Image: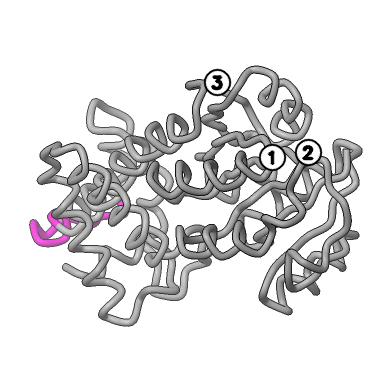
Amino acid sequence: MKVVFVGMGAIGMPMALRIKAAGHDVQGVDVAETSRQRARTQGIEAVGRYALTGKADVVVVMVATPQQLAALVEEALPNVAGQHWVIMSTVGPEAIIAAAAQLQQAGASVVDAPVTGGTARASTGDLVIFAAGEEVSLNHVAPVLTAMGRMKTVGNRPGDGQGIKVINQHLCAVHIVAAAEALNLAHSLGLDPAQVLPLVEGGAASSWMLSDRGPRMLQGTDVEVSSAVNIFVKDSGLVADAAAACEAEVPLLNVAHARYVAAAKAGLGQHDDSRVIETW
């Protein structure tokens, strides 16, 4: 199929490459010239605006914020009839429901399909995809989604996928901060965190985030960025908003969110999210 992929950033690029490797015709869109150049070196032609793209069967969206999604939809509306839009960004239920209503009214089909797994799993095509939409739409876009990872059908309406992702990001946000706090506690107790980490991660205290982020927490500020602090400022904020909308209590999430905000205010926003440990 002809696929337009919007958002060729750190995770979007490997996702688009997996679609291309599966035999689809991919054109990229990104506002950053550096991202467009990187796409071209990988064999994907990329433009700076959606309006400059050609016809597409499937439009995959991996923008960063609800505001970017709303602006993209507004730009694309005149020409979306007959297209299948797959919105994979983490933008929260309200944003996806609003975007889907506009797109469907203009004649497009919409699949809500946020992902988890990070850049490493994006590169290997092993993302977990929380896909929600009408069965006919899910079947149509399945060849594109399965090129990027394991497709889990979680509902039949836009918003269901984002709801699952909100829960996922709640746990991720809290687990990263918990890992940072624990390793800082080890240091305060006079222990070597580098020795403590392999001991505790093999037992009941283990978590995926502890094993993944823990080693990076033991490195310096300039450790390679897998996921930036600013991403969790945004995502934990979306979780807080979703919780407030349904009047759910999330005190642990609120503590974690405050730590990411503090890290961003300390100038660590563009650094790896493991650097939240520097707020202690």
Image: 5 above or below 271? above
Residue in the picture at 38% in, 61% down: 273
Residue in the picture at 59% in, 51% down: 119
Q: Cα distance, mark 3 to mark 1?
A: 20 Å
Write down the residue under mark 2: 82
**Label 1: few (<14), some or many (≥20) within 10 Å?**
some
The reply to whether discs 1 and 2 touch (Cβ–Cβ < 8 Å) is yes
Which percent across, then down, holds residue 240? 23, 50
Instruction: Please name whichever residue, 262 or 201, is drawn nearer the observer in this view of the structure.
Output: 262
Residue in the picture at 41% in, 58% down: 216
Residue 81 placement, left or right of 73:
right
Q: Cα distance, mark 1 to mark 2?
A: 5 Å
Q: Which residues are magenta?
A: 185-194
Image: 203 above or below 112? above
Mark nearer the viewer, 3 or 1: 1
Give amino acid for label 3.
Answer: Thr
Which percent across, then down, holds residue 158? 50, 33
Please tell me in which quadrant of the rendered image residue 228 appears.
Answer: bottom left
Secondary element at image label 2? loop
Write down the residue under mark 1: 108
Write down the residue under mark 3: 153
Please tell me in which quadrant of the rendered image residue 137 appears.
Answer: top right
